[in-house]
Image (cartoon, grey):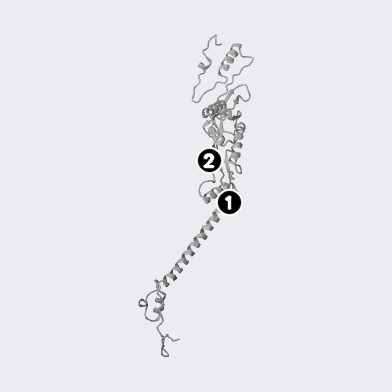
Amino acid sequence: MANNQPRYQAGYRPPQPVPPRRADMPSVSAMPSKGKGRRSAARGPQARPKRKARRGSGAAVAVISLLLMAAVGLAGYSALLYLDIQGQGGDTFYQGVYVGSVHLGGMTLEQAQAHLASMEQQQLNDWYVALQLPVGERRIVAADVDLRLDLTSQLQAAWQVGRQGSLMERQRVINQLKAQPYHATGGLAYDTEKLRTLLAQIQADVARDPVDATADFTPDNEEPFAYVDEVYGCYLDVAPVQREVERYLYSLESGAFAPALQQIPPAVTRAQLQENLTCIVVVNTEINYRSEPGRNENIRIALEKLNGLRVQPDEKVSFNKTVGKRTTGNG
């Protein structure tokens, strides 16, 4: 059988078939001819962007990781803060919240509502304020001023304490309640005119006019002057008393206090009388067995009119005017 294969000389290498070129592969003419440039070009323009993309994506991943860690930390802190707030109150009033004199800490809204409703009438029945006066104690009770109380109207405002704002703001308010409790006075009303009328009556009972000191002159006594001491008057200013009573009303606290009384001094005191009263003159007339009865009678009549005569400063005394005319009827 004849051999149809071509024969070549020793050392000759026939041309090799060229494999088909891919569409994304650069052509030979676009490739540098030699050196490192050829290797770089062979790898094509896509090699560099791949390395840059890896560096950029790594930084982005780091930033995202940090953000995620911060978000997780913040979420964890918020969760702890929320659990702490819930642990201190949750679905109950926080410690340090008062309506009137009632501490609501630890109560639910429904429990506080029921408790305050039962407390309202009891507080009205127990409330009083006593005025300690010189004429005795005067007590004012709720019925005297038509005192009315509505504690439950303040529940919603008290419930919101520590429940508004961000978690940090709520925590700050809750912590402040330990040192500065929240007090709501409740809906309280009373008849102001009745209170004024009552205090005016007490004012009239307390009022006292001053009494001047007096001196009685009895010439026949060894001590001719007998003194009666002065008496100071007093007056009750109801304006400060009303303010103090209203303070007890608003706080619903019972108690007693002694209102300050204003003293009214007398016009004449015993010290003034003792300083200004004195015996000016002593007159003696000798009477013995030789005196005629008519003379003795005249002396008696004259002395009765002169004895104990009060002479004011700079006053002139006339014997004839004081004793009277010398007539038969006059002795």
Distance (Cα) linking label 2 and label 1: 23 Å
Residue name at image x 42 percent, y 70 percent: 49
- Residue located beneath label 2 in the image: 157
Please tell me whether mark 2 or mark 1 is closer to you in this view. 1
9 or 173: nearer the viewer: 9
297 or 44: nearer the viewer: 44
Give me the disc on residue 250. Answer: none
243 or 224: nearer the viewer: 243
| Left or right, 61 with reference to 120 | left
The disc, 2 or 1, on the residue closer to the chain's N-terminal end is 1
Hey, which quadrant is residue 219 in on the image?
top right
Q: Residues within 10 Å of mark 2 (few under 14, many from 20)?
A: few
Q: Amino acid at mark 2?
A: Ala
- The answer to whether one can see residue 304 in this image is yes
Give me the disc on residue 83. Answer: 1
Which residue ends up furthest to the bottom in the rendered image? 10
* Up-down relation of residue 267 to residue 76 (above or below): above
Q: Amino acid at mark 1?
A: Leu
- Location of residue 127 in the rendering, given as x and y in whole percent from the top left corner: 60, 33
- Location of residue 213 in the rendering, given as x and y in whole percent from the top left corner: 57, 26
Look at the image and tell me in which quarter the C terminus lies: top right
- Location of residue 34 in the rendering, given as x and y in whole percent from the top left corner: 38, 81
Look at the numbered discs 2 and 1 and tell me whether their residues touch, using CB distance below 8 Å: no
- The answer to whether one can see residue 255 in this image is no
SS type, badge 2: helix
Hey, which quadrant is residue 119 in on the image?
top right
- Location of residue 70 in the rendering, given as x and y in whole percent from the top left corner: 51, 59
